[in-house]
Amino acid sequence: MSYRFPLLLALPVLAAAVVLKGPSDPLRPSTPQDGVGPLTRRRYWVEIEGSTHPAERIAEHWRNHLPQHAPKWLTWFRGLDHPVPPVRQGDRLWILMFLIRRGRVIIEHVDPLGFRARTLRLHPEAGTTDFRVYPGAQTGGMILQIESLLRSSSHFDRLAYLLGIHAVQRQNWHLTLTSVARYAGGRVVDRGTESLETPRLEHTYHLPEQPSEA
């Protein structure tokens, strides 16, 4: 009986050690089927007016300078295959989140108005995040958006998300959007966050073939 309490205290530490060590295949692209818990779609956006740059230039700048726009104390990006910029389709990025949690992603799609990153197995989530610029009807008006479709990679990561990582993540992406909006010029007139959880994961979800670069 005297050994039970220390053992219970050690279990969370052992679980964290396993998660932080990472999977045996850390650089394999992952899909939501590799994760646990509900499939979550999250959307973060800002609307700006009077931008001094066209949407295509902003999207290209955002892709190549993502490490500069993301707050380093929350999400520190750098190139895994080569120094960045540039960031091209097929490039992999090294990430340090919250100064302790490692992550890896691959840029699986690039087009004139945005780019999409897919998680690799060494990441606390499994799925994709899309970074996009939507031109508005009025000259200089546009929406900058980050939309993710993800599941937690482990039960440990799901618990961390419920205990507060979701709020930190929201802060990270809104700071990123604010930084990109500052580059775009003009002024922010609206911003928001949307989140939708789907309890069941459809078995028809497959890793798509990588599209050709636009």
Image (cartoon, rainbow, N blue to C red):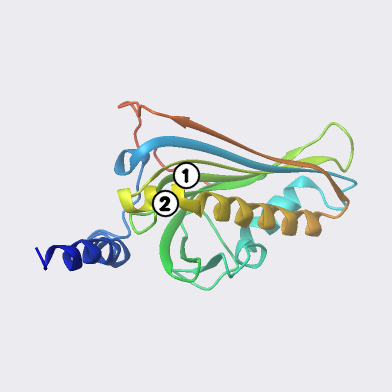
Report the side of 200 relative to 97 (left or right): left
Residue marked by disc 2: 119
At numbered mark 2, what does the secondary structure look like: helix, strand or loop?
A: strand
Q: Count neighbours of disc 2 (C-alpha within 10 A) and say few if under 14, some if 14 to 19, many if 20 or more.
A: many
Mark closest to the chain's N terminus, 1 or 2: 2
Q: Amino acid at mark 2?
A: Thr
At numbered mark 1, what does the secondary structure look like: helix, strand or loop?
A: strand
Of 166 and 203, nearer the camera is 166
- Between the C-alphas of marks 1 and 2, the distance is 6 Å
Of 170 and 141, nearer the camera is 170
Residue marked by disc 1: 128
Q: Looking at the picture, does residue 189 appear above or below residue 6?
A: above
Q: Is residue 111 visible?
A: no
Res 184 quadrant in image: bottom right
Q: Residue 61 at x, y = what percent?
A: 70, 58
Residue extending farthest to the front is: 1
Q: Residue 146 at x, y = what percent?
A: 61, 45
Residue at screen point 57% across, 51% down: 167
Res 168 quadrant in image: bottom right
Q: Are marks 1 and 2 in contact (CB under 8 Å)?
A: yes
Q: Residue 85 at x, y = what percent?
A: 60, 68
Q: Amino acid at mark 1?
A: Thr
